[in-house]
Each structure stands twice: as C-alpha cells, then as structure tokens.
Amino acid sequence: MGSIRRLVATTAVVATSILAIGSAGALAVFPDFTGCPTANPAVTACLDIQSTAGSLTIKSTTVPIGTSFALRGGLIPNANGGVGPATFVAPTNGSGVFSKPIKVPGGILGLEFWIPGNEITATAQLAGSASQIKVDPAELFVRVPVKLKLDNPILGSNCYIGTNTTPVWLNMTVGTTSPPLPNRPISGHAAEISFDAEGHVLFIGNVNVDNAFSVPGATGCGIGLGLVNALVNAKLGLPSAAGNNTMIMQNNVGLGAG
C-alpha cells in the first residue's frame, strides 16, 4: 500500500492532463466527475465514490445498500505535503452525497408481506455541511455525517433518523474497526490501483466498513408532528448505541485531476 498511497497523494496534489468530465446522473457511469468544483483554484482532484453492494444494519434490521449511494466532489490536498485527509468541497450540482431510496424490509409494521401504506423507503442525505466530510484518498477513508429520510404515507414528509445537529457519523475504513461490545472488529479491503483510458486513478472493488457508530432516534415522523416516532423507534430499536450497528459498503473510487 505504500507506493499506492504515495501515488494517490501525488495525484491529489499535482494537476495532470487527466480529464475531469462525467455524464449526468449521480450513479449512471463510473467515474463520474459531474459538478467537480474546478473553478476553485485550490481544488486539485475530483472524487467519485459509488457503492456497488453492501448493507446497513441497525440492531436486528438490515437494509441492503446496492447501488444507492455516491459521494462526489472536489478535494483540496492536506497542507502537510498532500499527506493526510484532504478537504472535501461540494460539487456544483449538489451537497456531495447522492442517494436513491432503498426499501426497509418489513415496512412500518414489521411484516414482510405488502400492506397498503406499510412500505418504508430510506434515503441517505448529508447532515450538515459538506465541510464536515473528511476524505483520505491515500488511505481510502471517508468520514461523513448522514441522516436517513424515511418515506411512507403514515410517516409524512419530514421523518428522519438523525438530524443536522445529531447525525449518524460514519467512519468508513478499508482497515480494521475498533467497536465497543457487543460488536467485534471487522476489516475492509483496499483494491489495487488501476487506470482507465483517460488516465483516471481507479480503485475497483473496495470494501469500506464501520461498526462503531451510534444511531439516534427518529424525529418528525407522523405528518411532520412526530406522532409515530415511537413506532419507528420500536421497529428499528432506536436509539441504538455504538456497538450495535454495522455499515459495509462495497464501492469503486475514481480520482481525476481538478
């Protein structure tokens, strides 16, 4: 990994002739550098992380991630010679977090068969400012605050798990975690470096993990009045303390010069 880290750190610092052009759509093609904020002269690299599979487990409820999540924007290299976490800059076309709704198994009543009004979908959103996102392209590490928007006719349009002030903090690593009990350490996987025809730096098939995060209780569920917060909390076992939750995300990472 030493040579890989040096190469990626160099890529993040030195602008080369790599093209930073992507097509529209958050999860359409890879790598996709749409909206990379290259007008900012401090941005020297464009980042695209796209999920390909994985899951989010909150206590006993597991939600498949699939291709629902992407993180895209620009990077300003660490002042320490480009070594260490870079500053993330949101793209011109969004917050940096791009997500599609995913179905929560069992719906609001905890039943696996369909009942009108029972199905819940969850959509990940950035909680707070893009400036809170930390990315280390050399270590393939991402720290991002998220909130989950739950959608269902009964829940209304303002039902969230996590808020801008109390987000779910994900520290996604390809290394080994150090969670509190009852969770045990788990390890991710760093893919080998490769290049596409345009010279973009690619890591195909990373596995980033975190099982040391906590999940707060639901807010605003029930026509925006919080009338069924307790029902959502009972369904998912919220709030859920650190050591009871796990995020595993298989993903592809692309880097291009800004």
Image (cartoon, grey):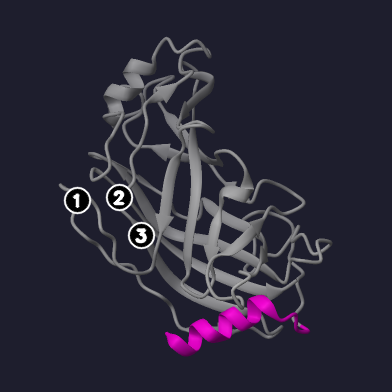
Q: Residues within 10 Å of mark 2 (few under 14, many from 20)?
A: many
Amino acid residing under circle 2: Ala
Across and down, in percent, residue 195 comes to 60, 85
Q: Image point 58% across, 56% down: which residue? A: 71
Q: CA distance from mark 3 to mark 2?
A: 10 Å
Q: Image point 63% across, 58% down: which residue? A: 88
Q: Where 103 falls versus 255 (above or below)?
A: above
The image quadrant where one finds the C terminus is bottom right
Toward the viewer: 78 or 221?
78
Q: Image point 50% across, 31% down: which residue? A: 163
* Residue 11 shown in magenta: yes
Secondary structure state at the residue bearing disc 2: loop
Toward the viewer: 77 or 229?
77
Residue corresponding to mark 1 = 183
Toward the viewer: 16 or 121?
16
Secondary structure state at the residue bearing disc 1: loop
Q: CA distance from mark 1 to mark 2?
A: 8 Å
Across and down, in percent, residue 120 comes to 43, 29
Amino acid residing under circle 1: Asn
The reply to whether dot 1 and dot 2 touch (C-beta < 8 Å) is: yes
Residue corresponding to mark 3 = 209
Residue interval drawn in magenta: 1-17
Q: Where 150 falls versus 57 (above or below)?
A: above
Res 102 label: none
Residue farthest to the left, as pictured: 182
* Residue 98 shown in magenta: no
Left of 169 or right of it: where is 98? right
Residue corresponding to mark 2 = 212
Q: Residues within 10 Å of mark 3 (few under 14, many from 20)?
A: many
Main SS category, magenta section? helix
Q: Image point 48% across, 90% down: which residue? A: 3
